[in-house]
Image (cartoon, rainbow, N blue to C red):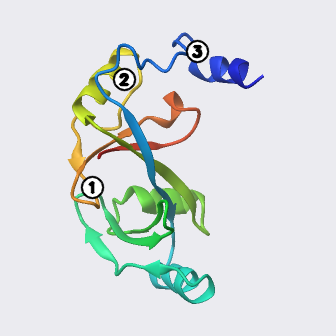
């Protein structure tokens, strides 16, 4: 059943992992990003109600966001508040006023090779080139229509 659902989601693309011909390796889940309308309110919830360690917010103007991370041990939650009128998070919050899951981030061991092979397999990226992300490492986003409706961020491990 799951294999047939995956085949529907992937269309013509092969179901194999591609490990034999891959020049890169998929790594661990780095974080799940959550768009929030009020950063301090969200930080307070995770810190005060759930007892999590929460970083101080950091502005990333090149991505149009204010970001903070909630430490979970095996992964993180990334809280995203819009920074400026052209922020993609502002557009997301216009459709989802209370906030919600925005994307997942998965580490890869060689981002340029991953992007090259994914594009060859007709997986689109939202930008032509990778940019430096919140962890100071190169990142690129994969088009949600090519990823089963999920916005996927790949981050160089």
Other residues around mark 2 within 10 Å, as few (<14) / some (14–19) / many (≥20): some
Considering only vertical position in the picture, is 146 above or below 121?
below
> According to the image, label 3 marks what residue?
11
Q: Which residue is drawn at 55% across and 80% down?
A: 46
Q: Which mark is residue 118?
A: 2
Residue 102, given in percent of the width and then of the height, sits at 51, 54
SS for callout 2: helix
Q: Where's residue 146, x and y in %?
A: 50, 28
Left or right: 80 as drawn, with respect to 115: right
| Residue that mark 1 sits on | 133
Q: What element carries label 1?
A: loop
Q: Which of 122 and 16 is in front in this view?
A: 16
> Residue 2 location, x and y as percent?
72, 25
Residue 38 vertical position relative to residue 66 in the rendered view, above or below: below
What kind of element bears circle 3? loop
The numbered disc on residue 95 is none
Instruction: Tell me what residue is drawn at x 56 percent, y 16 percent.
Output: 15
Pick whichever of labels 1 and 2 is earlier in the sequence: 2
Q: Quadrant of the N terminus?
A: top right
Q: How crowded is mark 3: few (under 14 residues within 10 Å), some or many (20 or more)?
A: few
């Amino acid at each position: 059943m799951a294999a047939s659902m995956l085949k529907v989601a992937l269309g013509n693309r092969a179901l194999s992992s591609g490990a034999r011909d891959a020049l890169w390796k998929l790594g661990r889940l780095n974080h799940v990003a959550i768009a929030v309308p009020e950063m301090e309110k969200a930080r307070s919830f995770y810190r005060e109600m759930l007892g999590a360690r929460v970083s101080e917010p950091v502005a990333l103007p090149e991505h149009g966001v204010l970001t903070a991370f909630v430490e979970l041990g095996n992964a993180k939650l990334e809280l995203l508040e819009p920074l400026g009128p052209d922020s993609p998070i502002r557009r997301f919050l216009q459709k989802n006023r209370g906030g919600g899951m925005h994307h997942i981030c998965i580490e890869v061991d060689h981002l340029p090779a991953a992007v090259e092979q994914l594009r060859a397999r007709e997986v689109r990226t939202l930008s032509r080139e990778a940019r430096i992300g919140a962890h100071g490492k190169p990142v690129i986003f994969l088009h949600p229509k090519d990823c089963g409706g999920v916005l996927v961020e790949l981050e160089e491990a």
